[in-house]
Image (cartoon, helix red, strand yellow):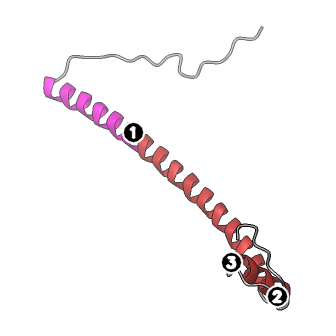
Amino acid sequence: MAERSRPFQNIRFIVRPGPKKLKILFVALILACTVALVALSMVRGCIRQRTQEALDQAAALEHENAELAEKADDLGTGSSIRDIAREELGMVDPGTVIIDPNS
């Protein structure tokens, strides 16, 4: 089996004593970057959730719009006007006898 080449095999990290203020600054910088990454991740999740909600709402509105367009097309016909008058207004055709079992 051929040995894999390791291009970074000869790199070594040497930590030397340095100014204490520089170390504190370095640690603070790492913490600030970590906090920023976590905050960005949370914002990204919130944006994804809002986007999905907006897409769902748009789909529902498109469906409702299609239903309303179909209903608007049907409104011009005589049978739809008769149905609306009968169902919503309680009107009947002339010459129709109404029998009310409650009277």
Magenta-highlighted residues: 20-40
Q: Residue drawn at (58%, 52%), measured in percent from left and top?
A: 52
Q: Nearer the viewer, mark 2 or mark 1?
A: 2
Q: Is residue 70 above or below residue 39?
A: below
Residue 2 relative to residue 11: left or right = right
Residue 37 is tagged as 1
Amino acid, disc 3: Glu
Callout 3: 10 Å neighbours few (<14), some, many (20+)? few
Is disc 1 placed on a helix, strand or loop? helix
Residue 88 is tagged as 3
Task: Locate residue 99, reporting x and y percent.
Answer: 79, 75
Examine the image and state in which quarter residue 71 appears: bottom right
Q: Is residue 27 magenta?
A: yes
Residue 83 relative to residue 34: left or right = right
Residue 12 relative to residue 76: left or right = left
Residue 93 is tagged as 2
Examine the image and state in which quarter residue 2 appears: top right
